[in-house]
Amino acid sequence: MVCTPRSGAHPCGGPGQTDRPRGLPGAAASGRVQRSNVTLHPPAMRNRIAAQLVIEHLLSRQSAVPPRTRVARLFGQSPLCPESVSWYLGAQGEITVGKMLATLPQDWTAFHAVPIGKNDTDIDHILVGPGGIFTINTKHHCGKHIWVGTRTVTVSGHKKAYLPAAEHEAERVTTVLRERMPLVAPVQPVIALVDPKQITFRDKPVQVKVLDARTLRRWLLKLQPVLSDDEIAEAVVILDSPATWRQHPTPAPADVMTRFEALDGQVRRARIRRVLWAAAGTTAVCAGSLGGALLATQAMLGG
């Protein structure tokens, strides 16, 4: 069924919620044989960009959306169909965290949108550095109240299975690494919350580190070193190999990002138009009210 675009403003960059269904760091893959949507050889994993799989899903859904009419564009109708909104906001969250990870010192290496398992799923980010090895699950909940307990996370009162999912991701990566590095410490699961209004910790989870994405970099750099340079290098080699993960043809990262940036530009311009029209409407109402008051005053004064 074809999606019908809808309008509607959202205070954090999109018209809807943030928990996408299940970096802008990273350069386009070098060694690409041709500019197409399929590469002949899987690129190194570190060349995948933040939110790559999410963006692929988003673009796939958007391909069925008819172009907006000139009038729709004029009035700021969103180019996103309802099914695309969560994917768009999820991509924004992963890109935000990816940009932050790109600012870490050179002894840290980040991998993004790592495909794992038989299903079409991925790990948002895997990070390797002196402080350890981490799986980072990004949750974009702009303006939401987050409550964190020992085994539960709620978003504006709705329970989410974030903690067990994060633990499972870390366990899978630990299993992968221990096939080559039997003595490596368990991978640390992290949940990075993007743009929440408030985070309340009733109790801290036992295994998963939950934090505001804005504090992630500072937390990482304060960790005591637990990996040697050789251990970091060995882990990076393992994680960087496509053979370690589920292999499948993927669009070249540069192509994916170019198409997303074009869509993102349309969404942002539509939002600006909606704001301008809303402001114009408010001004017109105020002007009308003022004009009515002046006429009433004039009538009472007999003039």
Image (tube, rainbow, N blue to C red):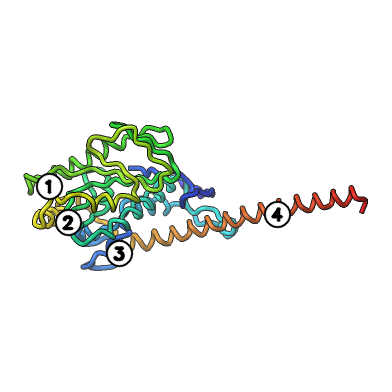
Is residue 72 visible in the rendered image? The answer is no
Q: Residues within 10 Å of mark 1 (few under 14, many from 20)?
A: many
- Quadrant the C terminus occupies: bottom right
- In this rendering, position of residue 170 left or right of residue 161: left
Secondary element under disc 4, as helix, strand or loop, is helix
Q: Residue at x 44, y 58 (%)?
A: 264
Q: Residues within 10 Å of mark 4 (few under 14, many from 20)?
A: few
Residue 45 location (% of width, % of height): 21, 57
Q: Earlier in the sequence, mark 2 or mark 4?
A: 2
The one nearer the camera, 24 or 55, is 24
Looking at the image, which residue is at 24% across and 49% down?
115
Give the amino acid at mark 4: Ala
Q: Is residue 260 above or below residue 178?
A: below
N-term mark: 3 or 4: 3
Residue 146, image x, y percentages: 39, 38
Label pair 2/1, CB-CB below 8 angstroms:
no
Distance from label 3 to label 2 (Cα)?
Answer: 22 Å
Residue, disc 1: 177
Sequence order check, earlier mark of 2 and 1? 1
- Crowd tier of the residue under label 3, counting other residues whose Cα lies within 10 Å: few below 14, some 14–19, many 20 or above: few
**C-alpha span from label 2 to label 1:** 12 Å
- 1 or 4: tag closer to the N-terminus: 1
Q: Please tell me which of labels 1 and 3 falls first in the chain.
A: 3
**Residue bearing mark 3:** 36
Q: State which mark lies toward you, 3 or 4.
A: 4
Q: Is residue 188 left or right of residue 303?
A: left
Residue on which disc 2 sits? 240
The secondary structure type at the circle numbered 3 is loop
Query: Marks 1 and 3, Cα distance to the nearest angstrom?
Result: 32 Å
- For label 4, the residue is 284
Residue 128 lies, in percent from the top left, at: 19, 53
